[in-house]
Amino acid sequence: MEISPDARDKLAGKLGGDPVGTGAGAAKGTRPSRNARNSSVDPLTRISMIIEDATGVDVEEISADSDLADDLHIDSVSRIDIAIRIEDAFGVRVEEEDLDAARTVSDIVRFVEARTPAHTEGS
């Protein structure tokens, strides 16, 4: 059984791999790599992908201004899941206080950027 290139790319994305034939010259309409560890993707997109994976909220519905509780309906269990995924993807430590302080997606982005080695060493 053979699947279409679009279906193969979608499956690869859901499994955390890069769709075949993507990269800098990816066809229009394709998403960036679905792997949140991919450091070539900006932090907001990476965090949005983490939120999507942890909660099921579609990444297209997530913006920097999205309120974690009111807009995205993220509960305390999902916040912990997101924190663990952020620690893994960005190599930063996330404390419970950090989770409680974050109200929007941009709060998480600022937190991660402030603790990411590339930003703390000389930016």
Image (cartoon, grey):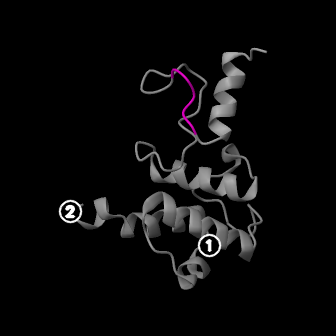
Spatial separation of the CA atoms under disc 1 and disc 2: 28 Å
With respect to residue 109, does 42 lie above or below?
Answer: above
Q: Is 109 in front, or is 10?
A: 10
Question: Which residue: 74% across, 58% down?
Answer: 55
Residue extending furthest toward the bottom: 97
The amino acid type, in three-letter code, at marker 2 is Gly
| Stretch of the chain drawn in magenta | 17-21
* The furthest residue to the front: 1
Residue at point 67% right, 43% down? 60
Q: Name the residue under label 2.
A: 122
Q: Is mark 1 on a helix, strand or loop?
A: loop
Residue 19: percent from left, percent from top: 57, 28
User: Tag on residue 84?
Assistant: none
Q: Where is residue 5 in the image (x, y as percent from the top left)?
A: 66, 17
Q: State whether residue 78 is above or below residue 9.
A: below
Look at the image and tell me in which quarter the N terminus lies: top right
Picture quadrant where residue 3 is located: top right
Q: Which amino acid does label 1 sit on?
A: Arg
Residue 78, x across and y down, in percent:
71, 68
Q: Say which residue label 1 marks.
A: 103
118 displayed left or right of 52: left
Q: Residue 105, how many percent across, how many down?
A: 58, 62
Label 2 neighbour load within 10 Å: few <14, some 14-19, many 20+: few
